[in-house]
Amino acid sequence: VNFWCTTTKAPWDWSWRAYPGVWLLVVALAVPYIVAIRRRQAQNGTVAGDGKRAVQFLCGVAVLWLSFDWPLGLLGAGYLATAHMLMFMLVTQVAAPLMLLGTPEWMFRRITSRLRITRATRWLAKPVRAGLVFNAILLGTQVPFVVDAMRPIAATSFLLDMVWLVGGFVLWIPLLAPAPELRTASFPGRIVYLFLAAGALPLIPGGFLTFSDIALYRIYELAPRVWSGFDAVSDQQVAGAVMKVGSLPIIWPVILALFLQWASRERGTNERAARPAAPPAPA
Amino acid sequence: MSGQLSRRSVLLGAVAGGALVAAGCTRGDDRAGGRFQGAAIDPPLARPDFTLTTTAGEPYSFAQETAGRLTLFFFGYANCPDICPIHLANITQALEVRADLQPVVTVVMASVDPTRDTPESLRAYLDGFDTTYVGLVGSTDELVVAQRAFGVPTATAPDEEGLVGHATSVFGIGSDDLVHVQFTGLTRQGVYVHDLDELAAS
């Protein structure tokens, strides 16, 4: 039994396989979270929003589980570039932001302090840096040489998935950091950042995958086919399309929400400015 | 599953290794300064001569039917879960990239599973990749002759999981009627694209 999904040359047959490392990760994320929240509530009482945050965090962990475990994890590790890319999207665009949304400010500060990454987090919270680092992670972990080298070994396959998770946190920190001082203040800045970092730059590597006429990833090219007729190049083209447009269902609603919040705030400011000054009180 | 795999891997490895020894092959690639990125056969072998039957029921004398044509030949079977569909998919993709070579290339697969591969099922299987690919069937004895002609060990009967141990290489034959190169089951599309050029120049 492998602890993490890796490349296998076995024909794909939909028979379930156990990956205990994935379960350990899920437990290691969910249990300490629940215990910490309970302890905090025992000390300080229930705080408004605790329940909603817990649901968000645990949904994020559930998405990680779905991404890393059988069948998607195994398909992505050794059979289909499409599954590999879907995993990347789920981890960076769904799991990571949900986990950030679900993390209370006190917990975030405690974690970054204990891991001694407070300064690094502050440095990465700047949109330009976060965008560049996220896209460097995206590119670095999608290069065929890297994927071909890392996926066949459980330890490096695990490392690749963890780098994706870190990349997801980096991408969303400027928008969703539980510590308010880390969030980008300006609404236009947030919108432009999200559009460029998560929507526009991935179009470039996605284009390479979509338009290459031969298979680029060795492991997916030489893997037994999951579905006859869905060959390695078609699979790669779909993977490229997922990289190019897979984030759109996430980022465009977020951009729209940011825009509406911005408009609402501007309207409130204008109304306050237009309101006549209160008449002086009678002497 | 791992038990099945290791059995199959050992079997296929042994067959492939035997094929290399039997054919007296050496691996030649760009790094070694060879023409081919696949395993070059040095000296090249003469185009083998044997007769099987096409999926249309016609006798097919391999040496006569493919004489003077760039040919990719391999032994496989329609229920093969791994190597054969990878070969076919990668050859198909390479020929899409080098569409100019399509008219001069003949792809031939001889079934080593005479009990399950009927002419109709083999035709349907190959049509899933390309309708021009030639599918050959034959009796066990005829297949032994064909495998000996290529210097590869004889395929096994299907095991309890229906897996057939067989030589996994694709043989590349130039228009000079010489077998110049063989491609293992882990041959990438780019290698086929490169070596098709070399075979065309043979």
Image (spheres, rainbow, N blue to C red):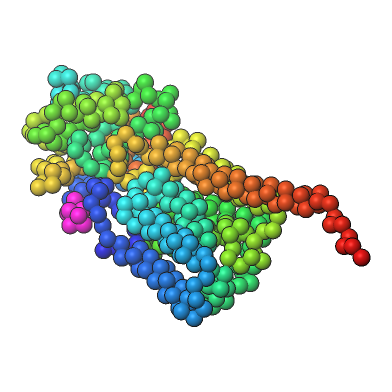
Above or below, A44 against B37 in this view is below
* Residue B33 relative to residue B117: left or right: right
Residue drawn 47% across the image and 50% down it: A89
List x then y, in percent, for residue B134: 24, 25
Q: Is residue A190 magenta?
A: no
Residue drawn 61% across and 67% down?
A179
Horizontally, residue B118 falls left or right of residue A63, namely left
- A171 versus B133 height, above or below: below
- The location of residue B117, given as percent across then percent down, is 14, 32
Q: Residue at x 56, y 45 (%)?
A: A253
A242 sits to left or right of A135:
left
Q: Quadrant of residue B82?
A: top left
Q: Nearer the viewer, residue A148 or A240?
A: A240
Q: Is residue A97 visible?
A: yes
Residue situated in front as seen by the camera: A2 or B180: A2
Q: Residue at x 26, y 57 (%)?
A: A17
Quarter of the figure with the N terminus of chain B: bottom left
Q: Main secondary structure of the magenta part?
A: helix
Task: Judge whether A155 appears above or below A145 on screen.
Answer: below
Residue B81 vs residue A118: left or right?
A: left
Q: Position of residue A282 (x, y in %)?
A: 89, 62
Of all residues shown, which one is farthest toward the front?
A283
Is residue B178 visible in this depiction of the protein? no
Depth order, front residue of A142/A238: A238
Start-end of magenta stretch: B1-9
